[in-house]
Image (cartoon, rainbow, N blue to C red):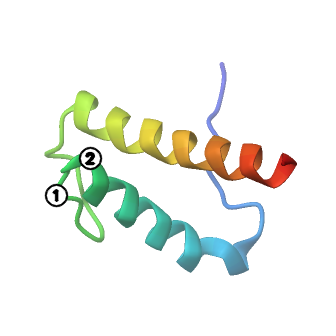
């Protein structure tokens, strides 16, 4: 049986990650709240995660220049 581990590797980064997630949600038009967001669809949640990954890749690529 597999277990998911979504603990933050660097606990001090939790606040910055939450802020990043809220910014990404705003960019894609998802009304993300602090705390419970179980009323969101998989598509909405996926779009937030996808936007976060897209921005992280853009930042990494720009750092390579």
Relative to residue 62, is residue 19 depicted above or below? below
Q: Is residue 27 left or right of residue 17?
A: left
Q: Is residue 62 left or right of residue 24?
A: right
Residue 33: image location, x then y, percent: 23, 66
Residue 62: image location, x then y, percent: 73, 50
Nearer the viewer's eye, disc 1 or disc 2? 2
Query: 10 Å neighbourhood of mark 2: few (<14), some, or many (≥20)?
Result: few
Query: 10 Å neighbourhood of mark 1: few (<14), some, or many (≥20)?
Result: few
Query: Helix or strand or loop: what does disc 1 sit on?
Result: loop
Disc assigned to residue 28: 2
Q: Residue at x 62, y 36 (%)?
A: 4
Relative to residue 11, is residue 45 depicted above or below? above
Residue 16: image location, x then y, percent: 57, 75
Residue 31 lies in quadrant: bottom left
- Disc 1 vs disc 2: Cβ atoms closer than 8 Å? no
Residue at the extreme right of the image, as rendered:
64
Q: Which one is nearer the viewer's eye here, 55 or 21?
A: 55
Q: Residue at x 24, y 37 (%)?
A: 44
Q: Residue at x 31, y 39 (%)?
A: 45
* Quadrant of the drawing holding the N terminus: top right
Q: Which one is nearer the viewer's eye here, 40 or 61?
A: 61
Residue at the extreme top of the image, as rendered:
1
Query: Helix or strand or loop: what does disc 2 sit on?
Result: helix
Q: Is residue 21 left or right of residue 26?
A: right
Q: Which one is nearer the viewer's eye here, 39 or 51?
A: 51
Relative to residue 3, is residue 30 depicted above or below? below
Disc assigned to residue 31: 1
Disc assigned to residue 41: none
Residue 34 lies in quadrant: bottom left
Q: Residue at x 71, y 74 (%)?
A: 11
Residue 35 lies in quadrant: bottom left
Per the model, the C-alpha gap separating discs 1 and 2 is: 9 Å
């Amino acid at each position: 049986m597999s277990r998911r581990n979504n603990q933050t590797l660097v606990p001090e980064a939790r606040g910055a990650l939450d802020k990043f997630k809220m910014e990404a949600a705003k960019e894609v038009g998802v009304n993300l709240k602090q705390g419970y967001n179980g009323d969101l669809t998989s598509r909405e949640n996926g779009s937030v995660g996808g936007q976060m990954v897209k921005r992280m890749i853009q930042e990494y690529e720009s750092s390579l220049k």
